Amino acid sequence: MEERIKNIINDAEIQSGLLQLASSKSKSYMVSYPYFIAFFKKFNIKENREELLYQGANMVYGWMPTMLDTQKKKVEVSAVISSIEKLGVESKSKDLEIVSKFMNNSIVGASKLLHFIYPEKYPIWDSKISKIM
């Protein structure tokens, strides 16, 4: 999957479509994006475990039309944090599934959270990007 994402990111036609989409939508995302990156750089997942998880997850969900309900799918916080740490080293679907369950069972929410924690490793994957694919 990681190779497919790299190919998608490097495809000029897709890049053009994403840029058109970004420019046609609210500028709010573009303005807030660097602030999100700066917030996540302040934290170390190993030191600020629950604080980063809850603050970060709720910030990311501020970009989504649905309120985050961390109680909807009962997932142990320690399991979510452990999976986030593992995903910083190696992408595994089992860990991505655990993070997704915590994020309202949403791969979109998980991709956004992981992007801000590890911006160089994970792109944001949402419905708008999926439509271009």
Image (tube, grey):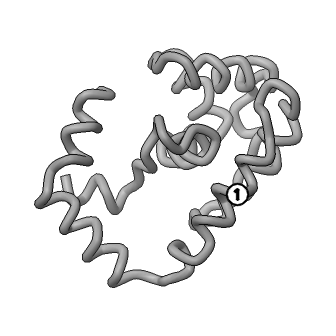
Q: Is residue 92 left or right of residue 112?
A: left
User: Measured from the top left, where is residue 59 in percent x and y?
Assistant: 72, 58
Look at 46% across and 20% down and name the residue there: 91
The residue beneath circle 1 is: 38
User: Measured from the top left, where is residue 62 in percent x and y?
Assistant: 67, 65
Look at 34% across and 62% down and name the residue there: 128
Q: Is residue 113 left or right of residue 111?
A: right
- Is residue 87 visible in this depiction of the protein? yes
Task: Count the labels in the image.
Answer: 1
Q: Label 1 is placed on what type of residue?
A: Ala
- Is residue 60 visible in this depiction of the protein? no
**Vertical arrangement, residue 59 with respect to residue 78, above or below:** below
Look at 58% across and 66% down and name the residue there: 33
Q: Is residue 67 left or right of residue 49?
A: left
Q: Which residue is at the front of the view, 41 or 55? A: 41
**Vertical arrangement, residue 64 with respect to residue 76, above or below:** below
Quadrant where the N terminus is found in the figure: top left
**Vertical arrangement, residue 6 with respect to residue 16, above or below:** above
**Vertical arrangement, residue 116 with respect to residue 13, above or below:** above
Badge 1 local density, few (<14 within 10 Å), some, or many (20+)?
A: few
Q: Which residue is at the front of the view, 41 or 75? A: 41
Look at 75% across and 55% down and name the residue there: 39
User: Measured from the top left, where is residue 123 in percent x and y?
Assistant: 43, 45
Task: Specify the quadrant of the image occupied by residue 36.
Answer: bottom right
- SS category of the residue bearing label 1: helix
